[in-house]
Image (cartoon, helix red, strand yellow):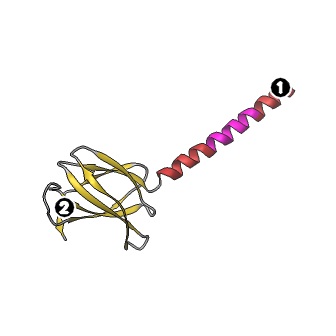
Amino acid sequence: MRESHIRLSIALVAFILAAIISGQDAAAEEGTCYLKASIKDVFVIVYDMDRDGNQGAQIWQGRLNQGESAKITTPHGRFRYDYNDQPDEDQPLSGGGDRWCNNLNTVMVPCGRRLTI
């Protein structure tokens, strides 16, 4: 009988530890996603968006070659990006719009719309 109590206690502790660890993984994925260059090389600048939809601080910038991805984390789960789809030429940036960033989703850049800024 005593041996079954010990096994039950060990199983309970293991279950609690597993729940804590998986909870930390889930929290780490909130506000985290991948940017992926969709059809060509692209230079991207990413800005945080606050809960009211206002553009915040720059959180990432860089070149993505076609098919390449970059992992980003946003404080509020939303971001706005500007891009240049001719990164080897000095061109004005285009606005890529506002996007959600959660659960390691993949956001294709550019997304198809082109708004020159």
Is 65 contained in the magenta span? no
Give the class, few, some or many, for how many residues have Cα within 10 Å of label 2's Cα (few <14, many ≥20): few
Which residue reaches farthest right? 2
| Depth check, front residue: 115 or 60 | 60
| Depth check, front residue: 6 or 21 | 21
Give the image location of residue 10, x and y in percent: 74, 33
Q: Please, what is the three-letter code of the amino acid marked with disc 2?
A: Arg
Give the image location of residue 105, x and y in percent: 37, 49
Residue at image point 71% right, 33% down: 11
Placement of 111 over or under 8, stated as above or below: below
* Quarter occupied by residue 58: bottom left
Placement of 8 over or under 107, stated as above or below: above
Mark 1 highlights which residue? 3
Task: Please report the bounds of the magenta region as a residue range.
Answer: 10-19
The residue tagged with tag 1: helix, strand or loop? Answer: helix
Q: Please, what is the three-letter code of the amino acid marked with disc 1?
A: Glu
Residue at image point 77% right, 35% down: 9
Is 12 contained in the magenta span? yes
